[in-house]
Image (cartoon, rainbow, N blue to C red):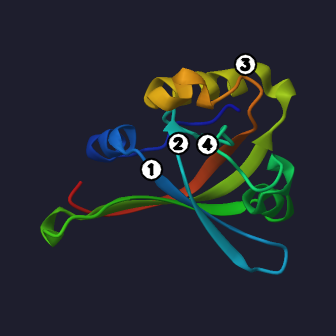
Amino acid sequence: MAGKPLKLSRPIRMKLREARIAHLATSDARGRPHVVPVCFAFDGKTFFTAIDQKPKRVMHQQLARVRNIEATPAVALVIDHYQEDWTRLWFVLVRGQAKLMPRSAGRERMKAIRMLRKKYPQYAAGMLRDEAPVIRITPKRVTSWGKL
């Protein structure tokens, strides 16, 4: 998906590159919230997360985050860092639109999978299949705070 890169400061871009976990907030059609920790990659304009091989209780199509995105694509993604030394706290809050990428999104989808495998050795070792469902999050607004 073409788009302008986000105008983020160098410190924020570095934190996004280094961060290992984010929390994805979705809501269902009735507005009930759901938050789940996710692995993610950021290419400068778009965030990606995938449904990996970790055991799930239901098929990927039945996961709350997938159903919620299909019903209500507005999401929030929080990437943060906590320490007991509160002068070192920071967070980045991304509000945007999420979409489950169809397999027909070939090139962009495989780019997302490559980025995720490069960032997470577990994915490179087989926890992320080529056919894994990928969620694309297009940011509309980014807010940050703290020691960036």
The local crowd at label 1, few if under 14, some if 14 to 19, many if 20 or more residues have their Cα within 10 Å, is some
Distance of label 2 from label 3 (alpha carbons): 18 Å
Element at label 1:
loop
Q: Position of residue 110 (x, y in %)?
A: 68, 22
Kind of residue at disc 1: Ile
In this rendering, is residue 128 above or below 110? below
Residue 101 occupies quadrant: top right
State how far apart marks 4 and 1 are (Cα).
Answer: 10 Å
Q: Pointer 1: what residue?
A: 21
Q: Position of residue 142 (x, y in %)?
A: 48, 58
The alpha-carbon separation of the residues under discs 2 and 1 comes to: 7 Å
Q: Is residue 89 above or below residue 20?
A: below
Residue at left offset 46%, top offset 31%: 120
Question: The N terminus appears in which quarter of the rendering?
Answer: top right
Q: Give the foreground label among 1 and 3.
A: 1
The residue carrying pointer 3 sits among few (fewer than 14), some (14 to 19) or many (20 or more) residues within 10 Å by Cα, namely: few
Q: Amino acid at mark 4?
A: Thr
Question: Disc 1 or 3, which lies upstream in sequence?
Answer: 1
C-beta proximity under 8 Å, tags 2 and 4? yes
Residue labelled with disc 4:
49
Mark 2 vs 1, N-terminal side: 1
Residue where numbered disc 3 is placed = 107
Q: Which residue is mark 2?
A: 40
* Mark nearer the viewer, 3 or 4: 4
